[in-house]
Image (spheres, coloured by chain):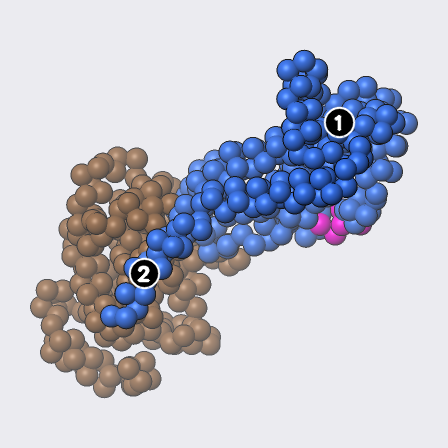
Chain colours: A brown, B blue
Amino acid sequence: MTVLMGPSGCGKTTLLRIVAGLDDRFTGDVGIPPGTRIGLMFQEPRLLPWRTVRQNIELVAAPDFSEADLEWLAHAVGIADMLPRYPQELSLGLARRVALARAFATKPDLLLLDEPFVSLDERTADRLRKLLLEVWQARPTTAILVTHNAREAIMLADQLVLLAPRPTHVIAIETIAVPHAERDHNAVEAIHTDLLRRYPGNFSNS
Amino acid sequence: MSVTFARTDTMPRASMFRGPIVSVLSVAGFLLIWFIAAEIAQSRLLPGPVAVLEYIYKESVHGDLLTQLGITLWRVVASFVVAMAIGSVIGLAMGQMPALNRALDPWLIVLLNLPALVIIILAYVWFGLNEAAAIGAVALNKIPNVVVTLREGARSLDPGLDEMARAYRLSPISKLRNVTLPQLQPYFAAASRTGISLIWKIVLVVELLGRPNGVGFELYLNFQLFNVTAILGYTLAFVIVMLAIEYLLVQPIERHSTRWRNKPV
């Protein structure tokens, strides 16, 4: 899992949108093999309010996505009871879980996550990060996550790309070798301290 | 605690005043006022509800009231379908293409302000006193309203959901069915609601001016005979038809298509 981290306004979201094929106002090349299945999680859930949770997921699901897959996924992200509900009945945290399930329902070759846990309280966000890791480790794919939250980045990244704003450029690519399972609070803080020492500009206000 | 108590207390009373009871009471009140007014007036020019209902019954069984209603209803439906189809295509296109919007906007304003009577007369003069001219003239009166409403709908489409559909590579048909049309539903509903009532009023004018049958023609005939009972009878009969359409067709469809909206958390 690659995490792009940088301050607001440095073009992280734009980069993700270009990769997702939503933005064609750029020059350069994006090498994505044709037929690549993409799962995308926006900053907002962006569910269809007139479709039930189940319909929202099934609408984008891969052709070979079975009822068993749906049940497994719904259980994994904790929305099994919510399938017949409409999105407006859900809290933001629950809606995010549905959006996460939807992104995985495409059985993606490439998973794109655009600050998926922004504007949630820290406890909910933390639970969802763990959920993301669990589901992702069960069905590993190439994943790119964008965030400005340093601890989120450290918790999730295998490769951490640090960006600087205006003109946007890559400062460094850090590999975090500690296995995800061992990144408890203390480990995250230790990595954070280390990175703060080496890149004060990127980690100072977090 | 007290909040819970207050709620359970008011719920049954509130539900009593919901549903069909209020509507029935309201109609009964109207009939009562009419009845009293007719009793006071005691005039051939203001028959009471009983006389008018008798006329409707008699003409339905022995006369051709039902046939005339059917003819008018067919014209209403035909004009409605034509106006909605053409109007929504133009409206959606104008809402999504600013250049087209600028080009067609003056036409739209002219059509919106052209009196129905002018359009009807010109249609009969240019295309003859026939069914196509009649239905076309009615539809043309309604089209600009549909265009304006659906143009607003197209402008209000959520770009976020559009991106979602593109990112997940929805097919055009799937996108239309699942993303675009549900967002336009309230605009279609608004256009249809105002559409049916506007159209049936204009259809009567069209029938009066140039058709040998239909409710409008009958009204004209009975106006010349000063037969107010017949005029009220035809009017009431058609109003009943429109009420039936509203309560048995339009509202159930609306309830079904907005069922996702009224659910509290």
Q: Where does residue A79 sit, x and y in percent of width and height?
A: 22, 52
Read off the magenta span: B101-106
Pick whichever of labels 1 and 2 is earlier in the sequence. Answer: 2
Of all residues shown, which one is farthest toward the right?
A: B125
Q: At 43% across and 68% down in the image, what residue appears?
A: A11
Instruction: Answer left or right for A183 relative to B58.
Output: left
Of all residues shown, which one is farthest toward the top?
A: B62
Residue position marked by numbered label 2 in the rendering:
B9
Specify the amino acid type for callout 2: Asp
- Residue A47 shows up from this direction: no
Q: Is residue B97 above or below residue B87?
A: below
Image quarter of residue A71: top left
Q: At 34% across and 46% down in the image, what residue appears?
A: A52
Disc 1 is attached to a residue of which chain? B
Q: At 41% across and 74% down in the image, what residue appears?
A: A8
Q: Quadrant of the C terminus of chain B?
A: bottom left
Specify the amino acid type for callout 1: Ala
